[in-house]
Image (spheres, coloured by chain):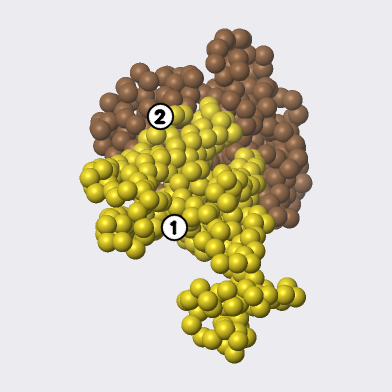
Amino acid sequence: MLWLTWRQHRMQVLLTTALLAVLGAVLLISGLGVAGFAAQNAPATDCVADTPACATYSVEMNERMRLVGEVLGWLPLLAPAMIGAFWGAPLLAREFEHGTHQLTWTQSVTRRRWLMVKIVGLGAAVTLGGLVLSGMVNLWLAAFDVPPYGVDYFSSRWFRLVGIIPAAWWLSAFVLGVATGVLFRRTLPAMAVTLAVCASAFFGLLKAPPLYAEPERVVQAEVMDDPVPDDSLYVSDYWINRNGVKFTSQERALALAGSCGTDETTKKYAKCSFSLGYRQVAEFHPVSRFWQFQWTEAGILLIPALALGGVAVRRALRPRI
Amino acid sequence: MTADRTVRMFDGGSGELTAPAQSPTALEAVRLAKRYRGTWALRDCTLSVPAGRVIALVGPNGAGKSTFLHLVAGLITPTRGSVRVFGEPVGQRAQALARVAFLAQDKPLYDGFTVAEMLRFGHHLNPGWDDALARQRLAELDIPLNRKVGKLSGGQQAQVALTIAVAKRPDLLVMDEPLANLDPVARHDVMRSLMVAVAETQLTVVLSSHVVSDLTNACDWLVVLNRGQVQISGEVDELLATHRMLSGPSELADGVAARMQVISDSRGERQADLLARTGPGTPLHDPRWTASGVSLEELVLAYLRRPDTTSLPRPALTIS
């Protein structure tokens, strides 16, 4: 059975492995370059942000991150869609389409065992692929994480490329593809629906992570440094007045124009606004919630996908053709 | 045939042991019925066929032939009734699957596999796989093992599919329209190679066709399915021996018809032709009447035109 699974799906396995290998090579070269650059050029960790030494370093690091980062930015959308469409959808749909299920289901291996080996075997491979991707991205990002430059793993830019989220997306998309294959029994419609559902899920969840928990809230009543830690996940900031009424920055500027003037960048302006009872509120998720959020998103994806997969497997196991 | 016939039994799919057959009945259906979305594809099919036969399943399109064969292969479950193959129920268990080989209508194979890979497929999925038999058959047929299945001719694909079914070493080989979509030469070759396999392995075979002439020479048991019911089930020789075409003057036809079961009745102005079920020695009394043998095709056609007439063996009749 393992041989058959490999023989029927080796194209997908080899192609995915090759793409991961190419990406790995690119990340390795880029990462080594960055590590070399950082070792030679990193200024003192406590350098002041706007001084030339500090700024040059940050600009160079940003530049080195940009190109590869843009390619990586597409992966959270493209990779699961491709996995669902090319690993999942054809798994059963192709058999139904060509009638080969009638051949395979009348050999001496039960339908249940055949299906389990395929789904578990390929599902494990897909999960492994997702973990390899996140491992590689993690190592690459670690090369940039040389102070004073910092990598914000919690930001939406990297959140879906590290930890368990790539694996969760890949596995869910695979199971979704298998399920649509059972439902439609034809490869192309199953692939199309899988792509569409993957894309909708991606855009639906794009801005969702800040909602995965109640954000922490700091109220600022005097002039101070940014109270939100750098590595946390920003949610929102706004102003409230003495009575707790919310103001956006513009509304506050309008309300203060008479008493504090219009130059919002000065300390005097800030002091003036605080003295009039205005308070700045920032909402964010501390970095300690990183894994909680990773697992939350994994659950949001995997629970419905596995439920759908269960329904599809039951349907495929029904004694009909 | 068949006191020494053995039935292979599998112990959880791994250990294999053989035991003498308890029943000489290869295929037994009892009140078998299948309904699809409110339509009965098969109604109350009851039949019993002894081992070692090549059974022709004949009937018009939509008679329920494929449904019947899918039930025998365990691909679908009956709405009512049961099917047994060599006394054991069919279905989705490994040991039940191992006993029956199935060749579906379009003879599906994995087009991207080479012939050798198709053999490997059979080997991996069947504990009783006979690799030597498979390779020998393909060598005799000059089918190259390294050729992709999708690049073979239709006849060669049919031969590969048949080889896989035979090398599984089933007790019963079920084939749904094995000759459809084949040219006359390929039909002949496939049939001949099937007969060789039957002779070598003592298989019991069920094959369906809506073309009776395809099966005349090869089959020794006939089952006619019409409108989802079994109309005839019997040994071909016996059926031919018990049916006669009677020809004589039209004016006397009523009298003759009253004495025997008439399947088809065509009367002209002067002469009447009655296809009747008779014993070989049934006297005609009247010298103006002549009796002649019928062909299998005439017999099947006559029955198909009269769906309410049946010719079935007495219950529990088995030949041992």
Q: Position of residue B72 (x, y in %)?
A: 61, 34
**Kind of element beneath mark 1:** helix
Q: Residue type at mark 1?
A: Arg
Split into 4 quadrants, where in the image is the N terminus of chain B? top right
Which residue is outermost to the bottom?
A258
Looking at the rendered image, the quarter that the C terminus of chain B falls into is top right
Mark nearer the N terminus (1 vs 2): 2
Q: Which residue is mark 2?
A: A3
- Tell me the colour chain B is drawn in: brown
Write down the quadrant of residue A11 in the picture: top left
Element assignment for label 2? helix
- Kindly identify which residue carries mark 1: A157
Name the residue located 32 percent from the left edge and 48 percent from the top edge. Answer: A44
Q: Is residue A166 visible?
A: yes
Q: Which chain corresponds to the colour yellow?
A: A
- Circle 2 crowding by C-alpha within 10 Å: few under 14, some 14–19, many from 20: few
State the residue in front, A18 or B309: A18
Rendered residue at 36%/24% (across/down):
B134
Please tell me whether residue A173 is drawn above or below residue B44 in the rendered image.
below
Disc 1 versus disc 2: nearer the observer: 1
- Where is B143 relative to A141, above or below? above
Question: Residue B49, can we see it?
Answer: no
Q: Nearer the viewer, residue B248 or B116?
A: B116
